[in-house]
Amino acid sequence: MVVKLTYFAMSGLGDPIRLLLTFCKMEFEDIRIGRKEWEKLKPTLKLPHLPMLEVDGKTYFQGYAICRYLARKAGLNGSSEEEGLAIDATVDTLMDMIKKTVLDYYQPDSEERSKCLKASLEVTIPFYLNVFEKQLEENNGYFVAGKLTWADIVVLTLGTYLCGIFKVDILADFPKLKEHRQKISELPVIKEWLEKRPADPEDYRLL
Amino acid sequence: MVVKLTYFAMSGLGDPIRLLLTFCKMEFEDIRIGRKEWEKLKPTLKLPHLPMLEVDGKTYFQGYAICRYLARKAGLNGSSEEEGLAIDATVDTLMDMIKKTVLDYYQPDSEERSKCLKASLEVTIPFYLNVFEKQLEENNGYFVAGKLTWADIVVLTLGTYLCGIFKVDILADFPKLKEHRQKISELPVIKEWLEKRPADPEDYRLL
């Protein structure tokens, strides 16, 4: 199987995929592109966004769909249809939070941006993190069924990314989520991967 | 299995689920609520949105996650992991189109709204429908692998919903998509269900 991942030179939606590929023990080409390469590549693609996964010459878009595919291969998609549903719903809820907050971060008007960021940090993010905190409580420290699934991996990588964007430890008041981050990031495969991965550029907005 | 679906008294994100439940031959309680009931129900829920599916007393949110769960039960999720990925990616792309256009429809400012609607009808919708048209061409008249999957059902129900919102046949210039709508809506299970389902209220913005 020849596998290539194309994404920007940053974590964002790329890291959950890179980590899941590592979990699957799939060799892959990690193509990280800059702004100029993206401007050239974009008009040639079926859809105007990344990540893009190539498997044996066939290309696939949509980051979470790609994660779910890899999670199935890695045995991280739960062990019943109901667990699969609970995992998907968790990831979709995380995605809701990210869409509602990261979009604010990319607002062009700086006054509008700081107003939105304030609302993100004071209202939107605490609301969702409370939902997740309760979920960890009900599932013995994991998101679904008391065991590792791809929901844990997506929350770990995207949570870290959000902390980087907001320059705040958004998990400070959420002990279960902090404990979860610690526990998941110390799993051997993940620990090794986190130590090796390239750092994000300082200014995310360049890409 | 005791199954209850709670959604607004309209098609929107509810109809793909209702139709997939019918495909699974699962008996379910189709709870359709109005604005006043929603105001009472909302603060009691884990997440402030519908649809919500209850399976044997456990509740699940997130409409597309629920569709995927039912699609697996109905045998409509493809027959390989790659097909599953292609289906998920199609649905996520449809969701991108809907989010970019329906959100405009709900703009409070009426001048802003008509500007956004114009852009939706002239730019965003034709862009995505072109992508889908090509996909139908490459997959023998279906979205994935030349056979019926839940991507076809979601596109059918949400496509019809969009036509209702915009009061325009958005598929007019897309012969493959028109043929697809015709073919899918004439499948016996779907045809029977379409004839029986309640009509949407005229003013969607009430809910």
Image: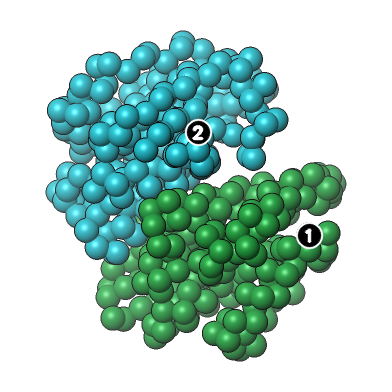
Chain colours: A cyan, B green
The chain carrying label 1 is B
Indicate the secondary structure of the residue bearing disc 2. Answer: loop
Which of the numbered marks, if any, corresponds to residue B174?
A: 1
Q: How far is the residue under mark 1 from the one under mark 2?
A: 28 Å
Residue A87 position, x and y percent, is 32, 52
Nearer to us in this view, A157 or A118: A157
Instruction: Look at label 1 and name its amino acid.
Output: Phe
Nearer to us in this view, B160 or B36: B160
Residue A146 position, x and y percent, is 16, 51
Nearer to us in this view, B195 or A99: B195
Tell me what residue is drawn at x 19 percent, y 29 percent.
Answer: A189
Residue A34 position, x and y percent, is 56, 16
Q: Is residue A128 visible?
A: no
Q: Quadrant of residue A125?
A: top left
Q: Say which residue label 2 marks.
A: A51
Q: Is residue B127 visible?
A: yes
Position above or below: A156 against B27: above
Q: Quadrant of the C terminus of chain B?
A: bottom right
Q: Quadrant of residue B193?
A: bottom right
Indicate the secondary structure of the residue bearing disc 1. Answer: loop
Residue B3 position, x and y percent, is 36, 78
Tell me what residue is drawn at x 45 percent, y 47 percent.
Answer: A65
B136 left or right, relative to B75? right
Tell me what residue is drawn at x 16 percent, y 31 percent.
Answer: A187
Position above or below: B52 against A109: below
Nearer to us in this view, A48 or B157: A48
